[in-house]
Structures are given as C-alpha cells and as structure tokens.
Image: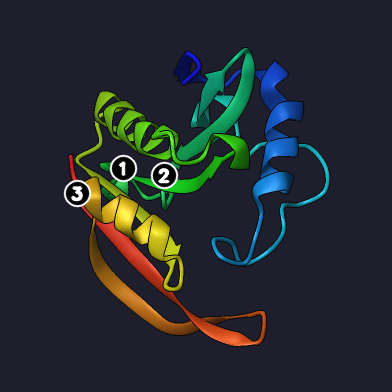
Amino acid sequence: MPEQYIRVAVPTDEEELAVLDRATWSTLHAVSPPPEGPFFDERHLPEDYLVAEAEGRVVGYVRLARPTPLASNAHVLQIQGLAVAEEVRGRGLGRALIRAAAEAARGRGARRLTLRVLGHNAPARALYEAEGFAVEGVQPEEFLLDGAYVDDVLMGRRL
C-alpha cells in the first residue's frame, strides 16, 4: 500500500475535495448530490476537515462539526461527511479517518461523537459499529431515494 497520512485540510485542497466529493457521491450514502460551487464556505471551513493523502493527492476526507450551535451541546461533535476514493477503498482509509476524527474530537474537548447514516448503507454501518458507534435512534423511512424509502440512523459513541 502506498504511504498515506491524515492531516487537517487547507484552502488549497478545495478543488481536489470537490472532485472527490462528486466522484464518490451516491444514494447509498447521501440524500442529495454535492452542491455546485465552492467546496469550502462559511459553514464548511478547511479546519473542519481531515484529509487522507496518498501518493501526494487527496484520496479521502472526514468532516467534523458541531451538530447544533447551542452551548449546552458543545461537548458533542458530529461526523458530517466521509468519503474515500474508489481506487483506494478496502485499504483501511475509512477506518483511519474515523479514528483520526475521534482523536481530533477528543482534542477539541468533545465527550461524544455522533453521526447519521442511511439505513441501507450496510458497509458504513458495519465500519462505524466496529469503531465503537452504536445505534441511538432511527427515523424510519425518512428519505425517498431511488424509489425506495430509507431510514435515517443516528449513531454515537463516547470518547
């Protein structure tokens, strides 16, 4: 496997991240296509992303953000995006990104890490469970994707 590492995103990663986001999008893991326009904006800052780099290029990312702006919820961070390039899947990058996100969340003072995953995304759910996440709630048939109703599953773990 080529050498890889995970680091905080920088503004110059924007184009590679946008291309990766478009290339990896599917209704297996997202309810709508990536928006047109810039990857980074006032709600999606470079410092919110950890990127996986291999062979000098960005091949994955995870986004960490606060689920709400409430002070009473400041101890919780949420994974709000995870992508790994097709050609490097199966090499442990998704797992490494999740572990890096948990470590970064701890470093930011979080006590809990949560995420939402589509019910039909069995590979992602298995990965999250293997990394200590448990199902904490299900919104049945929350989304209509490709003609089928899909559950929205909330998962979380203590840090």
Alpha-carbon neighbours of circle 1 within 10 Å: few (<14), some, or many (≥20)?
some
Mark 3 or mark 2, earlier in chain:
2
Disc 2 residue crowd, few under 14, some 14–19, many 20+, Cα 10 Å: some
Quarter of the image for residue 92 reads: top left
Instruction: Name the residue at 50% across, 20% down.
Output: 8
Residue on which disc 1 sits: 74
Name the mark nearer the viewer: 2 or 1. 2
Q: Secondary structure at mark 3?
A: loop
**Which of disc 3 and disc 1 is earlier in sequence?**
1
Nearer mark to the viewer, of 3 and 2:
3
Kind of residue at badge 2: Arg
The structure residue drawn at horizontal position 58% and vertical position 86%, both measured from the top left corner, is 148
Residue 26 as seen in the image, left or right of residue 67:
right
Q: Are marks 1 and 3 in contact (CB under 8 Å)?
A: no
| Left or right: 125 in relation to 136 | right
The percent position of residue 6, horizontal first and vertical second, equals 45, 20
> Looking at the rendering, in which quadrant would you find the C terminus?
top left
Image coordinates of residue 155 in percent, x first then y, are 30, 60
The kind of residue on which mark 1 rests is Ala
Under circle 2, the secondary element is loop
Which is more toward the observer, 65 or 94?
A: 94
Q: Position of residue 125 (x, y in %)?
A: 35, 60
Task: Give the Cα separation between the discs numbered 2 and 1.
Answer: 7 Å
Q: Which mark is residue 132?
A: 3
> Of tags 1 and 3, which is closer to the observer?
3
Residue that badge 2 annotates: 66
The residue sitting at 45% across, 16% down in the picture is 5
Residue 43 appears in the figure = no
Q: Residues within 10 Å of mark 3 (few under 14, many from 20)?
A: few
